[in-house]
Image: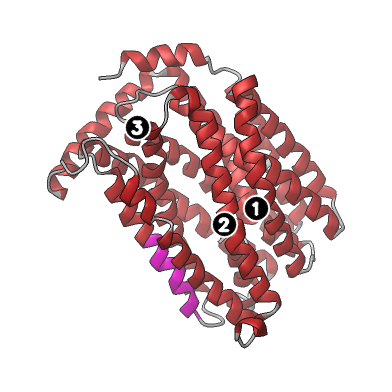
Amino acid sequence: MAGFFPLFFKQYWAADLSASESTFMLGSLNAFASLVVVILAPLLGAIADKGSSRKRFLLYFACMGVVMTGSLFLVAAGGWWLALTLYVLAVIGFSSGNVFYDALLVEVVDEADVDRVSAFGFSLGYLGGGILFAVNVLMTLNPDWFGLADTASAVKASFLMVAIWWALFSVPVMLFVPEPGGGTSSDLSAGIKAGIGQLRETLSKLTQLRQAWIFLLAYWLYIDGVDTIVRMAVDYGLALGFDSNGLIVALLITQFVGFPAAIVFGQLAERWGAKQCIYLAIGVYLVIILWAYQMNQVWEFYMLATAIGLVQGGIQALSRSYYIRLIPKDKPAEFFGFYNMLGKFAAVFGPMLMGGVSLATGNPRLSILSVAVLFVAGALLLKCVDEEAGKADALRFEG
């Protein structure tokens, strides 16, 4: 979805739109999907915790993402509105499901190991995604090897394969990951009512958890920069006139570099602390943005893809594990609802900022430069977080 969708959208589904128009549409719909998650995430987390039904909600949203992603296989050339609609629903399914996936981490690991395990989870995600992506890239470069008519058929088949892969690897968490209190949920209407009441209580607690709140604001800003680069990198490369095959290879590099790099970040966090490693990742992203602003050769895009792979999984994994330290451990889905809410609420502005700057100026280089503001502001707020004070506050609200 980060690689093939923006490329295929620009060249196949929205071929009749200008480059600036398609960038604006993709950015706007990404923002809309994020806004929906902003509204849903805290309420869903409260409902799931109240009824001990995190796995059930994870299954619902995984199924939603699987079906919508697989349905892209059926969209014909020129059907850009239908493609965007399915894309938005798939993003909502994926992002909402992550609320419950993240919350389950609290149940399977102790605090002493949370950085390492969180990083290992992201590293395996990069490896698994990279393996499938490598097969799909090979399909698009040599469609005849797979009995496919052309590159377009190969890309559409890739969306279907992603859906199957997603469904297959959702099975282990459903069967083998424990959820204390599972199966005690009441009917849906009672769960929603209880969840709304619990949401009010959680919001009240969160406003008193000063360190967690400051961290969420910092995360809101810098993770927006991360997500915007992930979602808009291929579109940016196309706008600079780079060959689409080269951009896909660059994304493949990011996947496989991300596998060992995320593990390394988990090990570094055990030595230096998660917060210092997040600063390191933000610094690398600022260098990446400055380089991207002036790059002219496709080999530079490869180098930037490598650099992104070195830090992307690390900043995602350590943000999650750092946040776990600042919240009560007895209602993780509720607090991860707010975590995902602010992360996605930030993503309302990032793609819109990049797409709006590109449309207003006609200069895609300025659009990528604007993302640096998000990283700088996030780093400054993160500096204000006191981890020990945050742990003490969280303990007061447990039980």
Callout in the foreground (2, 3): 2
Which residue position holds label 3?
332
Residue 366 place in picture, x, y as percent: 75, 49
Q: Which residues are magenta?
A: 64-75
Residue type at mark 1: give it: Gln
| Mark 3 crowdedness (10 Å alpha carbons): few <14, some 14-19, many ≥20 | many
Residue 192 place in picture, x, y as percent: 19, 44
Give me the residue at 74% from left, 69% from top: 245
Residue 95 placement, left or right of 129: left
Q: Main secondary structure of the magenta part?
A: helix
Question: Quick one: label 1 or label 3, which is nearer the N terminus?
Answer: 1
Residue 285 placement, left or right of 39: right
196 or 247: which is nearer to us? 247
Tell me: residue 172, above or below residue 223.
Answer: below
User: Tag on residue 129?
Assistant: 2
User: Is residue 355 in view?
Assistant: no
Q: How is the image coloured?
A: secondary structure
- As drawn, which residue projects farthest toward the front? 176
Which residue position holds label 1?
255
Residue type at mark 2: give it: Gly
Whole-Å distance between the Cαs marked 2 and 1?
Answer: 7 Å
Give me the residue at 35% from left, 23% from top: 328
Residue type at mark 3: give it: Pro
Whole-Å distance between the Cαs marked 1 and 3?
Answer: 29 Å
Q: Secondary structure at mark 2?
A: helix
User: Is residue 9 in view?
Assistant: yes
Badges 2 and 1: C-beta atoms under 8 Å apart?
Answer: yes
- As drawn, which residue projects farthest toward the right? 297
